[in-house]
Image: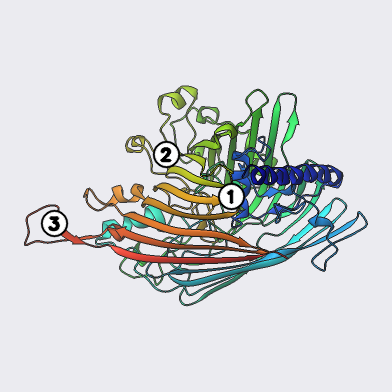
Amino acid sequence: MLLTKITYHRRYCVNYVLSAIMLSVFYGTGWAQSLPVGTPLLEDFYRREQLLGRLDSTVSFSIRPLTNAVIQRLNIYKPNGVVAVRDKSIYNFTTGDTLKVHILPVQWRHQINTTIPYGWNDGAMIPSAGYQTMAAAGIYMQYKFLSIQLRPEYVLAQNKAYQGYNGKSAREWSQWYVAIGNSMDKPERFGEGWYSKFLPGQSSIRLNFDPVSIGLSSENLWWGPSLYNSLMMSNTAPGFAHLTLNTTRPVKTPIGAFEGQLIAGRLEESGYLPTPSGNPDHFDNYYRPKSDDWRYLSGLVLTYQPKWLPGLSIGFSRAFMMYSESLEGKIANYLPFFAPTSKSSYSEEQDSALNEGEGIARDELLNMFVRWVIPAANAEAYFEYGRNDHPWDSRDLVVQLEHSRSYIFGFRKLTPLNWLGTDYLNVNLEVAQTEGSKTEDIRRGGPWYRHGGVRHGYTHLGQLIGAGIDPGSNLQTLNFSWIREMKQLGVQFQRYVHNNDFFYRISDDMRRNWVDISMALYGEWDYKNLLISSQLHFIKAMNYQYELEEKPEIRNYWSFDEQDKFNLQFQVGLFYQF
């Protein structure tokens, strides 16, 4: 037993040291291949390696996609390999020290929702009932400091009809259009019949000068330390085209390590109406067409890990969104990050949630976060706090800290299950809240991800860029799993509260909140070059679409006909590495 344990850890240490040596050779040429956000098995494997003390603790895991320079592997898709980049096979080859070519893994995902759309953090896939599939493949090439990654994605969805929102009165429909239909580009259904779309996916062209990279990319981004949701950037929507300037690894200085990214992106509309067919009872009366102009998104994220507090990283991110016609060629509109964060700096007039004092219709999100990794305990904890509305001044910020806020906090612990240290029990908890605070009753703040001036909201191609749960929603997640290296078998429990901000606009009935209770059984397994992931998700949507039916013959207030829906979601993904 002792010999087995020593052999296991010696093999790992040898691979780690060789990787570090080989990477130091390639750093001069800026070798910076990236691991797409949401890559099955691999992305979470590297994060767990950090909790076990096998990966550099200065990596914040709050700016993704990760690069091989960050995770210290020559081939980012082969965590146990160190010389794969120099393979002379038909899939990976190097000519001298100039041209490097790598055939990227093929990914093929399948999903079925039996009754209603469900799911997020799935990139190109759409919220859809019925069957859906997504396929991706590509190639990575690098010549000296120039790198090109072509990894397009294709999605095909049955897009089956299902019951959407069904207001019972003109007032309810009016409020639905105010809160959702006219202030966000988030259609209930993406047209009629099958949905098919070809996207650039996780593609990029970059100039790499270690530790900095600059280029054009359509890759998904993830900003923040959370596992299941991110207030600022996630992979719920497809990746959007953006210019990027970012670090490819932590930049170590005498006072600590820094990471950062600056982007300028283009967000597109979905092209679909908020409701499928336009019921004349409400559509003609309340729907207001949105601008057909594209939106400009500028974003900045920075992290810092103090030298004297290893494992602790703090950071912030800030994003601005506006229609392109409002840019007016001004540098201050293209790079607004140095704009004040208090409204008193813009105007001495009355506070406003729409930022009229800035003289321009744009939406802003601000997020601060912290992550603490404790390798000695094989654990991590993290927290995000964001605001959707400027405070008037610093005093206002302290007095009404809850105003327009959202937050996420979570904890994760790995516990060894055997003396060898190869099997672990993984336990993690995450709580996300985007529901507005009580201050909304007396002060306009604007729900997260939607805005009166930028009426498409914080979306791209009809899906949210930030947290996958709807605005005004809350999610609690509890997860248990058995882990052995990349293999994982687990069970996950979730409670998902749908858009309470909207619910309290239309109802004072305490019985009608729409809440999903779910349990998922999932597994992840690697066999040679094949990675397999699968999940069976049981979802009970209680008071679906905020509905219930009274029983007039019974006087008991809590006796009513439950308007619940049951949805079975099945997912399976195949990921083949050449």
Q: Secondary structure at mark 2?
A: loop
Q: Nearer the viewer, residue 352 or 34?
A: 34
What's the distance in space between the residues labelled 1 and 3, CA to CA?
45 Å
Q: Residue at x 47, y 37 (%)?
A: 389
Q: Earlier in the sequence, mark 2 or mark 1?
A: 1
Q: Residue at x 41, y 61 (%)?
A: 537
Say if mark 2 contacts mark 3, CB within 8 Å.
no
| Residue bearing mark 2 | 445
Give the farthest residue toward the bottom: 193
The amino acid on which the numbered mark 1 sits, given as a three-letter code, is: Asp
Q: Is residue 488 above or below residue 368?
A: below
Q: Nearer the viewer, residue 529 or 403?
A: 529
| Residue bearing mark 1 | 44
Name the mark nearer the viewer: 1 or 3: 1
Work out which quarter of the rendered image holds the C terminus and state it.
Answer: bottom right
- Picture disc at residue 201: none
Neighbours of disc 1 within 10 Å: few (<14), some (14-19), many (20+) = few
The amino acid on which the numbered mark 2 sits, given as a three-letter code, is: Gly
Q: Quadrant of residue 180?
A: bottom left
| Residue bearing mark 3 | 559
Q: Secondary structure at mark 1?
A: helix
Neighbours of disc 2 within 10 Å: few (<14), some (14-19), many (20+) = many
Q: Earlier in the sequence, mark 2 or mark 3?
A: 2
- Which percent across, then down, holds residue 444? 39, 39
Q: Is residue 272 above or below residue 403?
A: below
The amino acid on which the numbered mark 3 sits, given as a three-letter code, is: Ser
